[in-house]
Image (cartoon, helix red, strand yellow):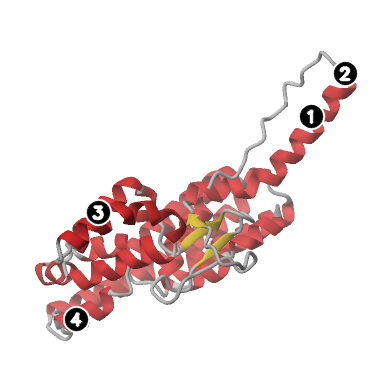
């Protein structure tokens, strides 16, 4: 179980600003569903990662990151023993106060006109080109100028290629057959509408972000950048891409697969020794559904 936890690579992901939200959500799910089944050594690792995530709040200045840490601390309060719980809450209070002070300073500077509130559209387009679909949708809600920049067709074309062509091309061949025929009839393509229509068939891809799983070895994979190159599994090197979006709720299943399979094997052995008597502790094996 500890090896599977190390494969998740949560500590490096928490260090990356772009992956902090996903890693924090996964850590929250692990606390709620897997912490009680983990051995003591693994519980120590999980606790250290929780403290690391809370301390990272000092470097992150958005309320969005604060809400992620709040959920993590709430999960820690329900699961961790009293001493560790107290330590997490104390660090969170310190980080939350510093976070609030930093936001007040930034708000004061913007009200006094000390910082430039408007960015040129070409600069916005460069920044938006690094965002995934979920982040781009949130950025479009900030103000009118950001909303206008977020409607740029080139942004949605690149986002479509990254989301549905490069990473998950093994499953999108059927999609392209019907849509490419429409593209040939109409030279101008509404890439934003095309992205939304394709997303209806695979709604989980909207939340894919930089996280995926390999369908061959079941290994979770972090993407350093979805917009640069074509990511692949570091173990299963081959010509075909076999990656699928990995949601936070699936992480606990991946982590618990070994422990549950072990309990299944032990229960089956006891059933063999005493035929006709079914163990009430028998648990059906949980497969990692990707």
Q: Which residue is mark 3?
A: 196
> Do residues under tags 3 and 1 come within 8 Å of each other at their CB atoms?
no
Going from the N terminus, do you reach mark 2 or mark 1 first? Answer: 1
Q: Quadrant of residue 7?
A: bottom right
Q: Helix, strand, or loop for circle 2?
A: loop
Q: Residues within 10 Å of mark 4 (few under 14, many from 20)?
A: few
Q: Which residue is mark 4?
A: 109
Q: Which residue is mark 1?
A: 267
Query: Residue 288 in the image: x percent, y percent?
Result: 59, 45
Going from the N terminus, do you reach mark 4 or mark 3 first? Answer: 4
Q: Helix, strand, or loop for circle 4?
A: helix
Q: Quadrant of residue 152?
A: bottom left
Q: Which residue is mark 2?
A: 274
Q: Which mark is residue 226?
A: none
Task: State which mark lies toward you, 4 or 3.
Answer: 3
Q: Marks 2 and 1, how far apart in space? A: 11 Å
Task: State which mark lies toward you, 1 or 4.
Answer: 1
In depth, the one of 172 and 262 nearer the eye is 172
């Amino acid at each position: 179980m500890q090896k599977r936890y190390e494969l998740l690579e949560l500590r490096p992901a928490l260090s990356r600003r772009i992956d902090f939200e996903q890693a924090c959500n996964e850590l929250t799910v692990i606390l709620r569903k897997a912490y009680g089944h983990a051995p003591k050594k693994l519980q120590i690792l999980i606790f250290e990662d929780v403290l690391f995530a809370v301390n990272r709040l000092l470097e992150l200045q958005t309320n969005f990151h604060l809400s992620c840490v709040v959920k993590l601390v709430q999960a820690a309060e329900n699961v961790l023993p009293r001493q560790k719980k107290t330590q997490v809450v104390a660090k969170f209070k310190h980080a939350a106060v510093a976070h609030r002070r930093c936001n007040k300073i930034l708000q004061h500077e913007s009200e006094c006109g000390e910082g430039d509130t408007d960015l040129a559209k070409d600069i916005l387009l460069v920044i938006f080109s690094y965002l995934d679909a979920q982040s781009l949708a949130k950025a479009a809600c900030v103000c009118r100028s950001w909303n206008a920049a977020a409607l740029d067709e080139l942004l949605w074309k690149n986002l479509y290629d990254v989301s549905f062509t490069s990473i998950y091309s093994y499953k999108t061949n059927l999609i392209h057959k019907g849509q490419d025929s429409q593209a040939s009839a109409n030279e101008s393509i509404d890439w934003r509408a095309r992205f939304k229509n394709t997303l209806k068939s695979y709604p989980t891809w909207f939340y894919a972000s930089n996280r995926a799983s390999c369908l061959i070895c079941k290994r979770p994979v972090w993407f350093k950048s979805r917009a640069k190159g074509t990511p692949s599994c570091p173990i299963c090197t081959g010509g075909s891409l076999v990656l699928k979006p990995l949601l936070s709720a699936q992480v606990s299943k991946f982590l618990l697969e070994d422990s549950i399979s072990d309990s299944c094997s032990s229960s089956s052995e006891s059933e063999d020794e005493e035929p006709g008597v079914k163990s009430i502790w028998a648990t059906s094996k949980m497969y990692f559904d990707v």
